[in-house]
Amino acid sequence: MKIRSSMENGIKTSQSPDAQGTLVPWTKPFLFIRERRYTMKTLLTFTAVICLAGAALGQQPSPAPKLAPEHEKLQIWIGDWQYEGQLQNSPMGPGGRFVGKETARPVLGGFFVEFRGEETGPAGAFQWQETDRYDLINTRYTWSSLGSDGSTSVVVYTIDGTTVPYSGTIVLGATRYQIRGTAVFAADLMSFVDKREYSTDGKTWAPLFESKSTKIKAAPATALQELGDLLVARWTSDVTWAVDYPGLGKKGERVAGFEVWKRMADGAALECDYLLGATCGRTVIWWDAAAKQIRTLDVDSGGNWAQGTITRQGTKWVWATAGSFADGRRVEYQSETTFPDNGRSRITRGVTILEGVRNEFRDVFRRVAN
């Protein structure tokens, strides 16, 4: 005879006699309890899902991270450089003259700067890579580099105007060396001198090398091409008038606009047609071979005009223009343009100088299509 347990087919049973006195299973109270338990469980689960869904719908997306002013200082390195120097005899290798070149570019939204370099020295050819960043927690800059001789380095530094003092370590083979030094930039940031020392014990220091780096000025076609790569697109604009503009608007008025940049004359120039508030206008940019500069000319339907030059300083494009308003007043503009958010935004900040008064402005543009 098969013995039946009180758990039958997954249902707990009780027993009561029938009319003939035979015990029969009685499951309803237990089924009711189980059904009630599962019904409550389902309800609680459903309620939790609704609450979580509501919270998710009400949750605002996290704002995109923004560059701190300290990140902007990293632009001091941006560009193509050539360098030469004198290396001293040391446990790291023989002394002698070395020459090289390097390129520094902003990466990952400008939060980092990536360097790639190659040089020839007493030990032969050498290639290296480096990544610099700003440490928001420890409030200092760091660089980490790798060399084709198997060396690695980790260094911290500060940027004090045109002076960059640094210290850290280099590992070459199975030996760790301490280094310290200072890079001093020229006032125009187009060159810097780097003097470095090393130590094997952190107490006794000796000269390692002294070098000079010089920024390579972009060739005319390259400079205009690079500016065009950044500008050629359709943009929306958000502008606040810095002064009273004849035919355009009053000082402090905020206006929206739209502009289209494109190449012209087989790429020899750039042009922009724009609508801004109640006015329209055109800007033309070209390379002046005689002056070896990028030039620009702007006119608008209010009868105002300005012309001048554009130069590149790292990732900034510096504009210096002058002209006149329709009412005869002379006006001058000094500004710089940057392209944050991987080129999706364009910010121009500077001053409008009118009758000797400097009026600050900051205009914002958003790329909407290439």
Image (tube, grey):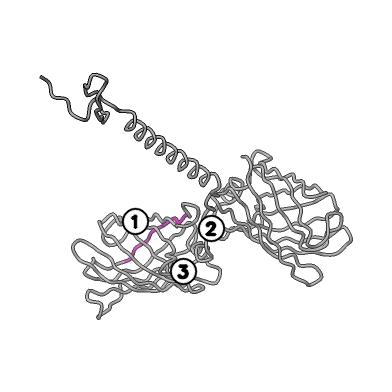
Find residue 128 and name its label. Answer: 1
3D distance between C-alphas at marks 3 and 2 = 29 Å
Residue type of the residue flagged with mark 1: Trp
Task: Look at the numbered disc 1 and give the secondary structure of its residue.
Answer: strand
Q: Nearer the viewer, residue 124 or 366?
A: 366
Task: Residue 364 in the image: state x and y as whole percent.
Answer: 66, 54
3D distance between C-alphas at marks 1 and 2 = 29 Å
Nearer mark to the viewer, of 3 and 2: 2
The residue lying at 33 percent from left, 54 percent from top is: 127
Task: Residue 218 in the image: state x and y as whole percent.
Answer: 54, 54
Q: Are marks 1 and 3 in contact (CB under 8 Å)?
A: no
Snapshot quadrant of residue 120? bottom left
Residue type of the residue flagged with mark 2: Lys
Q: Mark 2 or mark 3, which is nearer the start of the sequence?
A: 2
Q: Which residues are magenta?
A: 97-105
Task: Say if the magenta span includes residue 104.
Answer: yes
Task: Residue 4 in the image: state x and y as whole percent.
Answer: 17, 25
The residue lying at 28 percent from left, 71 percent from top is: 178
Q: Is residue 307 left or right of residue 230?
A: right
Residue type of the residue flagged with mark 3: Phe
Dot 1 crowding, Cα within 10 Å, few <14, some 14–19, many 20+? some
The residue lying at 37 percent from left, 61 percent from top is: 99
Snapshot quadrant of residue 263? top right
Q: Quadrant of the N terminus?
A: top left
According to the image, label 2 marks what residue?
66
According to the image, label 3 marks what residue?
192
